Image (spheres, rainbow, N blue to C red):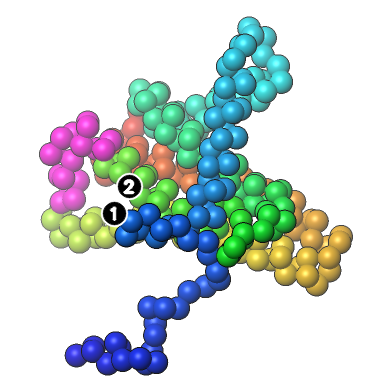
Amino acid sequence: MLNFLDAPNVLPIASLEVGHHLYWQIGNLKIHGQVFIVSWIVIGLLVGASLLATRNAQRVPKGIQNLMEYALEFVRELAKNQLGEKEYRPWVPFIGTLFLFIFVSNWSGALVPWKLIKLPEGELAAPTNDINTTVALALLVSLAYFYAGFSKKGLGYFAKYVQPTPVLLPIAILEDFTKPLSLSFRLFGNILADELVVGVLVLLVPLFVPLPVMLLGLFTSAIQALVFATLAGAYIHEALEGHGDEHHD
């Protein structure tokens, strides 16, 4: 019935694409090279900062050690607020990694002049302004809260889908699909919109006007990383506690 779509020059929807990308072909898999390049740079920065902070740890921290300990304390409190005193410790690495990766990725798009680096196709930018990255992060959160629920409740985890009444089963299933969608599109939309606004202002008024917008972009980028990590913790807590259960520290 839809064979007419295969005809040449007739509604080539599948070939539509926004912008140009540097593709790497690995077997039958085609991936965005520029996203992986900047992602590896961000991961390298985080790993390098961690190694420097712990290489010669002092009882009274200073410099990079002080910065990383502050980041660890911030992430620990974030996880504790969402998961509670009893459950938060195993999830600090996961939530902390999400927060730091998104935070550094967002700021890299605002602070680093990636456009000065020429590629055969496309251009370097923050990994979080690509929908593939944000969807992948959101799917990791989905796997995490399913794992949390199964690891604590086993097959009893499925009971939440029919509580308090089986009539809510379709809504409960739909909720599991909307969680990663909302996480991914919220992060992607905010980061992409911020970069587009700054890019347009730089073209129109190239010096002073974009600066306040860039500062605001740094603030909103940090907030988006915090929102993503907070919601990840909230979803994991919901899987551990179940719908409608009260949580007590």
Residue 10 position by quadrant: bottom left
Of the two numbered discs 2 and 1 in the rendering, the one whose residue sits closer to the viewer? 2
Name the residue at 28% across, 35% down: 148
Q: Quadrant of the N terminus?
A: bottom left
Residue designated by label 1: 176
At x 55% / y 71%, what residue is drawn? 19
**Can you say whether 1 is above or below 240 in the image?**
below
Provide the major secondary structure of the magenta segment. helix
Number of labels in the image equals 2
Q: Position of residue 180 (x, y in %)?
A: 37, 54
Q: Is residue 84 something that shows in the picture?
A: no
Q: Secondary structure at mark 2?
A: helix
Magenta residue check for 149: yes
Q: Please say if 116 is above or below 235.
A: below
Q: Quadrant of the C terminus?
A: top left
The answer to whether residue 246 is above or below residue 122 is above
